[in-house]
Image: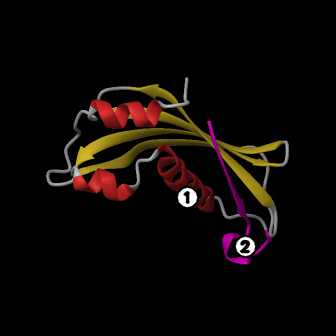
Protein backbone atom coordinates (compact mmCIF):
# COMPACT_ATOMS: atom_id res chain seq x y z
CA UNK A 1 0.00 0.00 0.00
CA UNK A 2 1.19 3.48 -0.85
CA UNK A 3 0.31 6.66 1.07
CA UNK A 4 0.32 10.15 -0.43
CA UNK A 5 -0.53 13.38 1.36
CA UNK A 6 -1.93 16.56 -0.12
CA UNK A 7 -3.44 19.72 1.28
CA UNK A 8 -6.83 21.06 0.18
CA UNK A 9 -6.36 24.42 -1.47
CA UNK A 10 -8.98 27.08 -2.10
CA UNK A 11 -9.07 26.12 -5.79
CA UNK A 12 -10.16 22.59 -4.79
CA UNK A 13 -13.32 23.78 -3.07
CA UNK A 14 -16.77 24.86 -4.17
CA UNK A 15 -18.73 27.91 -3.01
CA UNK A 16 -19.54 26.22 0.31
CA UNK A 17 -15.87 25.61 1.11
CA UNK A 18 -15.87 21.85 0.66
CA UNK A 19 -13.89 19.85 -1.89
CA UNK A 20 -15.73 19.71 -5.20
CA UNK A 21 -16.55 16.07 -5.96
CA UNK A 22 -14.48 15.69 -9.16
CA UNK A 23 -11.34 16.97 -7.45
CA UNK A 24 -11.04 13.69 -5.56
CA UNK A 25 -10.21 12.11 -8.93
CA UNK A 26 -7.37 14.61 -9.31
CA UNK A 27 -6.07 13.78 -5.83
CA UNK A 28 -6.23 10.07 -6.73
CA UNK A 29 -4.35 10.69 -9.99
CA UNK A 30 -1.55 12.48 -8.13
CA UNK A 31 -1.37 9.61 -5.65
CA UNK A 32 -1.12 7.02 -8.45
CA UNK A 33 1.65 9.03 -10.12
CA UNK A 34 3.63 9.11 -6.88
CA UNK A 35 2.92 5.39 -6.39
CA UNK A 36 4.38 4.65 -9.85
CA UNK A 37 7.47 6.76 -9.14
CA UNK A 38 8.00 4.94 -5.85
CA UNK A 39 7.66 1.59 -7.67
CA UNK A 40 10.37 2.65 -10.12
CA UNK A 41 7.97 2.92 -13.05
CA UNK A 42 7.94 6.58 -14.10
CA UNK A 43 5.81 7.50 -17.08
CA UNK A 44 8.96 7.90 -19.20
CA UNK A 45 9.75 4.16 -18.77
CA UNK A 46 6.24 3.20 -19.84
CA UNK A 47 6.24 5.59 -22.81
CA UNK A 48 9.58 4.23 -24.00
CA UNK A 49 7.85 0.84 -24.26
CA UNK A 50 4.73 2.42 -25.85
CA UNK A 51 2.68 1.49 -22.79
CA UNK A 52 0.00 3.70 -21.34
CA UNK A 53 -2.95 3.13 -19.15
CA UNK A 54 -6.43 4.49 -18.99
CA UNK A 55 -9.18 4.39 -16.43
CA UNK A 56 -11.97 2.21 -17.75
CA UNK A 57 -14.18 2.35 -14.69
CA UNK A 58 -14.26 4.48 -11.56
CA UNK A 59 -16.64 3.71 -8.71
CA UNK A 60 -16.65 6.44 -6.07
CA UNK A 61 -18.37 6.49 -2.72
CA UNK A 62 -18.41 9.84 -0.90
CA UNK A 63 -18.64 9.34 2.86
CA UNK A 64 -17.75 12.74 4.36
CA UNK A 65 -16.55 16.12 3.00
CA UNK A 66 -13.04 17.54 3.05
CA UNK A 67 -12.64 21.27 3.58
CA UNK A 68 -10.24 24.06 2.75
CA UNK A 69 -6.80 23.54 4.36
CA UNK A 70 -7.47 19.92 5.39
CA UNK A 71 -4.49 17.58 5.10
CA UNK A 72 -5.57 14.48 3.22
CA UNK A 73 -3.95 11.08 2.90
CA UNK A 74 -4.69 8.97 -0.16
CA UNK A 75 -3.95 5.26 0.18
CA UNK A 76 -3.42 3.33 -3.05
CA UNK A 77 -3.24 -0.44 -3.42
CA UNK A 78 -3.61 -2.97 -6.20
CA UNK A 79 -6.42 -5.39 -5.37
CA UNK A 80 -6.11 -7.55 -8.52
CA UNK A 81 -3.64 -7.81 -11.38
CA UNK A 82 -4.69 -9.28 -14.72
CA UNK A 83 -2.90 -9.62 -18.04
CA UNK A 84 -4.20 -6.38 -19.54
CA UNK A 85 -5.70 -4.51 -16.58
CA UNK A 86 -5.55 -4.05 -12.83
CA UNK A 87 -8.02 -3.19 -10.12
CA UNK A 88 -6.88 -0.37 -7.83
CA UNK A 89 -8.45 0.71 -4.55
CA UNK A 90 -7.89 4.26 -3.39
CA UNK A 91 -9.15 5.68 -0.12
CA UNK A 92 -9.01 9.32 0.99
CA UNK A 93 -8.63 10.08 4.71
CA UNK A 94 -8.51 13.18 6.87
CA UNK A 95 -6.62 11.87 9.89
CA UNK A 96 -8.42 8.63 10.78
CA UNK A 97 -11.69 9.71 9.13
CA UNK A 98 -12.46 7.92 5.87
CA UNK A 99 -13.83 10.44 3.36
CA UNK A 100 -13.91 8.76 -0.04
CA UNK A 101 -13.56 5.22 -1.40
CA UNK A 102 -12.65 4.59 -5.03
CA UNK A 103 -12.38 1.37 -7.03
CA UNK A 104 -10.71 1.80 -10.40
CA UNK A 105 -10.24 -0.50 -13.35
CA UNK A 106 -6.99 0.52 -15.07
CA UNK A 107 -6.43 -0.87 -18.59
CA UNK A 108 -2.95 -1.10 -20.12
CA UNK A 109 -2.85 0.11 -23.72
CA UNK A 110 -0.45 0.33 -26.64
CA UNK A 111 0.13 4.06 -27.15
CA UNK A 112 0.33 3.61 -30.93
CA UNK A 113 -2.97 1.77 -31.38
CA UNK A 114 -4.80 2.64 -28.13
CA UNK A 115 -5.81 -1.02 -27.86
CA UNK A 116 -5.45 -3.11 -24.69
CA UNK A 117 -2.19 -5.03 -24.32
CA UNK A 118 -0.69 -7.54 -21.93
CA UNK A 119 1.57 -5.84 -19.42
CA UNK A 120 5.18 -7.10 -19.73
CA UNK A 121 6.17 -9.33 -16.79
CA UNK A 122 9.03 -7.05 -15.67
CA UNK A 123 6.66 -4.08 -15.34
CA UNK A 124 3.96 -6.24 -13.75
CA UNK A 125 6.47 -7.37 -11.09
CA UNK A 126 7.32 -3.74 -10.29
CA UNK A 127 3.62 -2.89 -9.92
CA UNK A 128 3.06 -5.81 -7.56
CA UNK A 129 6.20 -5.32 -5.45
CA UNK A 130 5.08 -4.75 -1.85
CA UNK A 131 1.38 -5.18 -2.70
CA UNK A 132 1.04 -8.72 -1.36
Q: Is residue 84 visible?
A: no
In this picture the colour scheme is secondary structure
Q: Position of residue 41 (x, y in %)?
A: 41, 48
Q: Residue at x 74, y 67 (%)?
A: 8
Q: Residue at x 24, y 55 (%)?
A: 48
In the image, taking residue 57 as reference, residue 28 lies left or right, namely right
Mark 1 neighbour class, 10 Å CA radius: few under 14, some 14 to 19, many 20 or more: some
Quadrant position of the N terminus in the picture: top right
Magenta region includes residue 10:
yes
Q: Position of residue 95 (x, y in %)?
A: 84, 48
Vertical placement of 1 versus 14: above or below? above
Magenta region includes residue 110:
no
User: Tag 2 or tag 1, which sits nearer the N-term?
Assistant: 2
Secondary structure, mark 1, is helix
Residues in magenta, as a range = 1-17
Q: Position of residue 132 (x, y in %)?
A: 55, 23
Q: Is residue 129 visible?
A: yes
Q: Quadrant of residue 112?
A: bottom left
Q: Which residue is mark 1?
A: 30
In the image, taking residue 52 as reference, residue 6 lies left or right, namely right
Q: Residue at x 80, y 69 (%)?
A: 68
Mark 2 neighbour class, 10 Å CA radius: few under 14, some 14 to 19, many 20 or more: some
Residue 15, disc: none
Residue furthest right as drawn: 96
Q: Which residue is mark 2?
A: 9
Q: Quadrant of residue 7?
A: bottom right
- Please state the total of marks drawn on the protein image: 2
Q: Position of residue 121 (x, y in %)?
A: 29, 30
Amino acid sequence: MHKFQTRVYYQDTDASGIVYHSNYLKFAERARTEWLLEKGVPDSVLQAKNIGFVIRRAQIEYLAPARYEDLLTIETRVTAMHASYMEVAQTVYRGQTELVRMMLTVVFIDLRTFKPIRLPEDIKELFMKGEE
